[in-house]
Amino acid sequence: MTTPLAPLGVVYACVFLLAELFLITQNAGFFLTIWRVARGARAAARPAPEPPALVPGAYPRVAVLVVARHEPRDVLEPTVTTLRNLNYPAKDLFFLDDSTEERYIKEADELAVEYSLSVFRREKRHGAKAGIINDFLKTIDHPYVAIFDADQNPMPDFLLRVVPILEQREKLAFVQTPQFYTNLDVGPVAKAAGMQQAIFYEIICEAKGSNRSMFCCGTNVVFRRRALDEIGGFDEESVTEDFSTSLKLQYHGWDSYYYNHAEVFGMGPETLPVYFKQQMRWAAGTTNVFKKIPGYFVRGPKKLSFTQWREYFLSSSYYFIGLALFILMLSPIVNLLFDVTPFVGNVSLYLLTFLPYFFITQFLFILTMMDRKYSFSQIYHGVILTFLSVPIQMAAAVRGLFSKKKIFAITTKGKNVTLPFPMLIPYIAFMALSVVALAKGIVMYFVLHDHALVMNDVWVVHNLFICLNIFYFNKKIKLPQTAEEKTNGDPGRGD
Amino acid sequence: METRDEVIKKIERAVLTEENAVQLYARHLKAIMKWSGLAKKDRAEIEETLNILIRDSHCHAVALRGIRERLLKGGGDV
């Protein structure tokens, strides 16, 4: 790596530099987040503040919505049970069923009868979840609307804790609460997804909340109806309607609040196809909002504070991480196989600059999570799955930036599936290239005695190890039997 | 005063709650306790309490079903 850059090396160096700059920006954002959370007197270590009590007899009406499309009864029933158990006296439950398949419609109707729920369906589909909520809002006049996904189970006092916060602060558009996955023992994907949720809800959201830049996460949230009406309802143009609607609300002067209290539990994705589908939607949706942010900024730079703009920029650009990581992971292979050098420098300089940066960011992250009682194994699972999501995040980022076609797929849980072979090809190809590059690197080291080759080989081994994990995460798991399987005498999924 | 049918309906809902809800909350709480930072001994104690709640809930469901049967056999409102 001490020879001058070749023309192709210059091009690759630019791309490499952009990727590094992106990662440094995101890491700096994460560092500020950790700093803010730590400075906030270790708020997460303490219970969230007790909200004020409502005056008995003066409870504002809350419409509690559960939105579902093709969700099996096994997933819906616990949610409906917990919603019915909300000990808030002025609540009305509504089941917004967007299913088109007869089987799910029938199951939803049966549940509605058993649990005395009002079912809402619409004639014409538009805008997926945002669309059905907007259509439904036209039929009610409740001042508050609580929204839950089909697999989210709130504790009985959820509304008693959240509604008083909205009552106390008139400019609050919504109060978001965290979600905790409790199916972590099902398999490695659930464990890793649970860890990623924890990083998001326990650190990132806490900092965003204190920066007045918390965005809605689509579920476990209570909205002020007036705020939604003012901006024309949920944004139907985005696949992450929660994120884009939040930006719109804050742009129009509304505030948001993050109530970091474990009040809602749910199921995380259990298999790679389900996890990737979820990631694809989130990544494409937020990247799509990223495109809109410059327009918002030009139209009203003072409508959000500098911190709010920064937070929205970091969140909406986060999913470019797939592209950035891919460029970095490809670098040692490109260098070893094609002699394309992205930067010129000596090994000592590299060891003195990049490695401390790399280890400090890794240690800071690991220590922060361990401080929150997460085990090393959980953290490891979360990190590896992030790396394995690189191809999906890349595809989603490109789609979010350039495609007008929306992906409205809902991530149905509880099905035991694995990635088909064609989806494993990118990983296998990368591993094959890594092995060839590694072999060439070792041979060349014995010929040239260039220490830079050792550094490249180390990174190749690191990346190869990450990729090998695809087989660990993509295995069949033992899921509990569904009601249907029990009836049919099926021994269970995953066998 | 409530009609017999209304009371039976309420009892049926209560049975559903006893049968499903307590188990459900217990399952979630047991899972989340792993991340609580509580000592193993304290976690075991809480888990035992949750198990007692589940057992009690079964008893409540049986009792409620008994009342429902009696109401179904009787004729008038309550």
Image: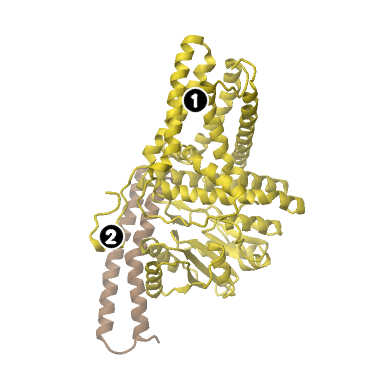
Chain colours: A yellow, B brown
Residue type at the position of mark 2: Glu
Circle 1 chain:
A
Residue at figure coordinates x 50%, y 43% from the top left: A392
Q: Which of these two is toward me, A15 or A228?
A: A15
Secondary structure beneath dot 1 equals helix
Q: Nearer the viewer, residue A84 or B33?
A: A84
A325 or B28: which is nearer to us?
A325
Q: Nearer the viewer, residue A292 or A358?
A: A292
Image position, residue A480 (x, y; %): 31, 54
Q: CA distance from mark 1 to mark 2?
A: 46 Å
The image quadrant that residue A62 belongs to is bottom right
Location of residue A224 (image quadrant)? bottom right
Q: Which residue is mark 1?
A: A459
Q: Secondary structure at mark 2?
A: helix
| Residue labelled with disc 2 | A485
Q: Residue at x 53, y 35 (%)?
A: A365
A272 is higher (above) or lower (below) than A492 = above
- Where the N terminus of chain A falls, by quadrant? top right
The answer to whether any part of residue A37 appears in the image is no
Spot occupied by residue A336 in the image (x, y as percentages of width and height):
51, 21
User: Which mark, by number, is residue A407?
Assistant: none
Residue A349 vertical position relative to residue A306 in the rendered view, above or below: above
Amino acid carrying label 1: it is Trp
Q: Are marks 1 and 2 on the same chain?
A: yes
| Residue A147 position within the rendered picture, expressed as x and y whole percent measured from the top left | 52, 63
Query: Of the residues under marks 1 and 2, which one precedes in the sequence?
Result: 1
